[in-house]
Image (tube, grey):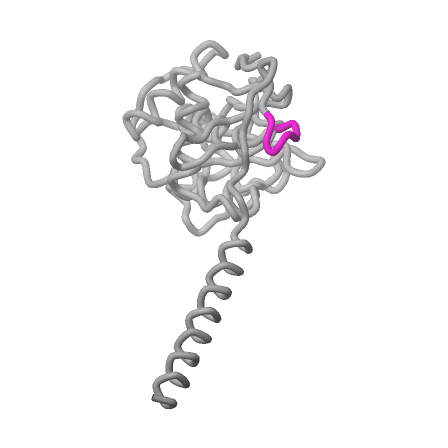
Amino acid sequence: MEKRRKLSKKIIRVLLTFMLLVTSMAVSVPAAPRITIRDGKVYQNNKPVTNKIVGSKAKGYYYVDKTGRKVNTREIRQAVDFVMRNSKAGDSRAKRLKVCYRALQTYPYFGMTNRAPKAKNLSSYARYMFSRHRGDCYYYASTMAYIARVLGYDSRVAVGGVTARGPAAPLSLHGWCEVKYGKSWRMLDCSMQRAHLDRNLCLVTRKKYPFRLRCDKVYTMTVKKAKVKWS
């Protein structure tokens, strides 16, 4: 009988220790961020949110612009979805940008147009690339600009000409994305990168770009009060 009582006490002590351990583990788990929208602006745990992706897997993710407003345009939502599928939320935005740059290169090149786009064309180019997973240099550039934007970078699309051949070769029509990286604008040239895997065309300045390049026009993306504008 005495042995049974001692055994029972040991079992109770073990159970109490286990319960305390489980309770302490439960307390240490951080609560999920609480997202609210007040007067059209987004807050996370009662703090204003700007220029980043927020949300959850259960309720969905979305981009909040610099004015603190949720952006619902189709291309921005597609960019958020692309970023969340192809990069890790816990990584730095620079690492996520590079990962997404490589992911976009897996979409095959497909000739779409033989002339440089205008500002009004860029959103439809990105929408097509996100949906159909193919396009030419202008489509890569537009799509990359949206990806960079939802990661918090100022972005733009540049159009002009390029050649990887000798100094006498004519320049071919070309477009690429540029992002404000630190204090300078850096190139993200997906289409040329696909053809020249031995070169680094990710986050390089125009001066350090390895091929002959000409820039004719730059279109800057502005996202303000939940509206996207190219100019």
Residue placed farthest to the right in the image? 183
Say which residue appears at 39% left-offset and 26% top-offset.
Answer: 78
State left or right for residue 42 relative to residue 161.
Answer: right
Provide the residue span drawn in magenta: 43-49
- Residue 145 x %, y %: 50, 27
Give the image quarter of residue 56.
Answer: top left
- Residue 191 x %, y %: 40, 35
- Closest to the observer, 204 or 67: 67
Q: Quadrant of the C terminus?
A: top right
* Residue 170 versus residue 167 in the image, above or below: above
* Residue 99 versus residue 14 in the image, above or below: above
Q: How many marks?
A: 0
Q: Quadrant of the N terminus?
A: bottom left
- Closest to the observer, 62 or 5: 5
Residue placed farthest to the front in the image? 1
Whether residue 170 can be seen here? no
Say which residue appears at 33% left-offset and 21% top-offset.
Answer: 128
Magenta stretch: includes residue 44: yes
Say which residue appears at 38% left-offset and 35% top-offset.
Answer: 58
- Residue 167 x %, y %: 51, 36
Give the image quarter of residue 112.
Answer: top left
Say which residue appears at 52% left-offset and 29% top-offset.
Answer: 150
- Residue 212 x %, y %: 53, 35
Give the image quarter of residue 3.
Answer: bottom left
State left or right for residue 179 relative to residue 98.
Answer: right
State left or right for residue 125 relative to residue 39.
Answer: left
State left or right for residue 141 relative to residue 152.
Answer: left
Whether residue 123 can be seen here? yes
* Residue 195 versus residue 44 in the image, above or below: below
Magenta stretch: includes residue 60: no
